[in-house]
Amino acid sequence: MMDERDERSRAGLGDSSGAAAPAGTEQELLAALRRLERIAEEMRGLLETTARVQRHRAFSFARLLGALFEALVGGLLFAALMGWVYDASPASLLVELALAGVLQLVALTAFVVARDES
């Protein structure tokens, strides 16, 4: 009860000024506040819709291809590391690393293509 009087007095709606505000002015203020609230809710709805649309990404074959090549590159790097640990020939390590480098470029190209599609 006391909080309502404080809020009304801060907003100029209370009887702290000695004379009560005219009923028409109070009704106009309430109507204006309702309009502002409705506009704020509409803006919030639009912002939420925009954020939801921006979070959603359509399926991209290029992105899928890039992810698959990225996984393949990781596997090749792991195989090269295991070959180095278990003393594989330097030529086979070089071939694995070169292939991993080429496939990494393919993956990066696929990700760039996917970014340009959206």
Image (tube, rainbow, N blue to C red):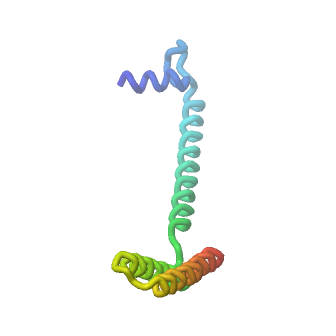
User: Is 80 or 70 nearer to us in this picture?
Assistant: 80
Q: Residue furthest right?
A: 116
Count the marks: how many?
0
The relative height of residue 46 versus residue 71 in the rendered view (above or below) is: above
At a point 39% along the width and 25% down the height, the residue shown is: 3
User: Is 80 or 118 nearer to us in this picture?
Assistant: 80
At a point 47% along the width and 26% down the height, the residue shown is: 7
Q: Where in the figure is residue 47, as x and y percent of width and height? A: 56, 57
Left-right relation of 81 to 100: left
User: Is 35 or 109 nearer to us in this picture?
Assistant: 109
Q: Quadrant of the N terminus?
A: top left
Q: Is residue 68 visible?
A: no
Q: Where in the figure is residue 28, as x and y percent of width and height? A: 59, 36
Q: Quadrant of the C terminus?
A: bottom right
At a point 52% along the width and 51% down the height, the residue shown is: 41
The relative height of residue 33 versus residue 42 in the rendered view (above or below) is: above
Q: Is residue 46 visible?
A: yes
At a point 37% along the width and 80% down the height, the residue shown is: 87
Q: Where in the figure is residue 69, as x and y percent of width and height? A: 49, 83
The relative height of residue 21 versus residue 84 in the rendered view (above or below) is: above
Q: Where in the figure is residue 30, as x and y percent of width and height? A: 54, 37
